[in-house]
Image: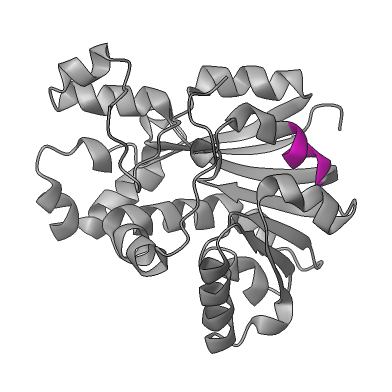
Amino acid sequence: MSKHTKDQSFAGLTDKFAKNIYATAKGQIRLAVLARDLAPLYQQSTPLRVLDIGAGIGQFSQNFARHGHHVTHTDIADDMVLAAQKRHQHEGLSSYYSYHCASLQKLPELLQGEQFDVVLCHAVLEWLAEPADALPLLKRFLKPHGKLSLMFYNRDAKLMANMVFGNFDYVEADLQVKKRVRMSPQQPIAPAAMDLWLKEHKLMVLQRTGVRCFHDYLREPEQGKQHFEQLLRLELQYNQQQPFASLGRYQHWQITHADD
């Protein structure tokens, strides 16, 4: 049982979220990696039905909308959903979207048994009080032969980064702090734990990618800004190769039913 009693919402933090995540090099790397990994899906000519869970301001799913796929955009924070609607309207993509303000746990009742060709769940599980409980819900939304795009905050990489930066006391304290930082994920997930959860629910991994395998370990972060294009090329070159993939601050796994 998690000691965290409720799921984290970013309600009231829309502008801060956009600035701290997507207006930075780390956010740009995240979007570029996802775009590369999922291009075979969103570039399909046959229209797909896509469910984006914890979709925030809806930046990444625009890749699907621009290729004519319909996206069901969901988030627990109503101001995030509103910001996404405004963004998609500005981009001329509103006709490809439907929107719901709801938690992951409320979606089965809201969507009434609907299933999707693609389910996107990016940087959501680490904000849940009980991340393991999300897996059967995600599976429920997935059509036979459908694809789940799951990105989660990597506990192993967090430990490695803190050792590199000399935060030995924090590592010995099992990465626990007395005071929570609202924009910092509090439930990092070890890939080995995720493998066990997936096996339990008869899901299998088709592809594993590390997100920010190098960026977060730079001794001089300013170099990442000055040489961003080169850094991005190297991230994309190595982030599906071991041992680098396992060091990604986030893991992006493409998943399907094990019995397909």
Q: Is residue 168 left or right of residue 46?
A: left
Asked if residue 58 shows in the view, the reply is: no
Height in image: 84 above or below 49? below
Q: Is residue 219 left or right of residue 206?
A: left
Instruction: Say whether residue 147 is magenta.
Output: no
Q: Is residue 2 left or right of residue 97?
A: left
Task: Identify the residue at horizontal 25%, vertical 50% (top origin).
Answer: 231
Whole-percent x, y for residue 104 in the image: 68, 48
Span colored in magenta? 136-141
Which SS type dominates the magenta stretch? Answer: helix
Height in image: 232 above or below 250? below
Task: Identify the residue at horizontal 35%, vertical 57% (top origin).
Answer: 21
Q: Is 236 or 76 nearer to us in this picture?
A: 76
Q: Is 205 or 186 nearer to us in this picture?
A: 186
Whole-percent x, y for residue 208 in the image: 55, 33
Q: Is residue 217 left or right of residue 209?
A: left
Q: How is the image coloured?
A: one colour
Height in image: 28 above or below 203? below
Whole-percent x, y for residue 196 in the image: 64, 17
Whole-percent x, y for residue 46 in the image: 81, 66
| The N terminus sits in image quarter | top right
Q: Is 186 or 35 nearer to us in this picture?
A: 186
How many marks can you see?
Answer: 0
Task: Identify the residue at horizontal 11%, vertical 37% (top origin).
Answer: 219
Asked if residue 152 shows in the view, the reply is: yes
Which residue ends up furthest to the front in the rendered image?
A: 5
Height in image: 151 above or below 171? below
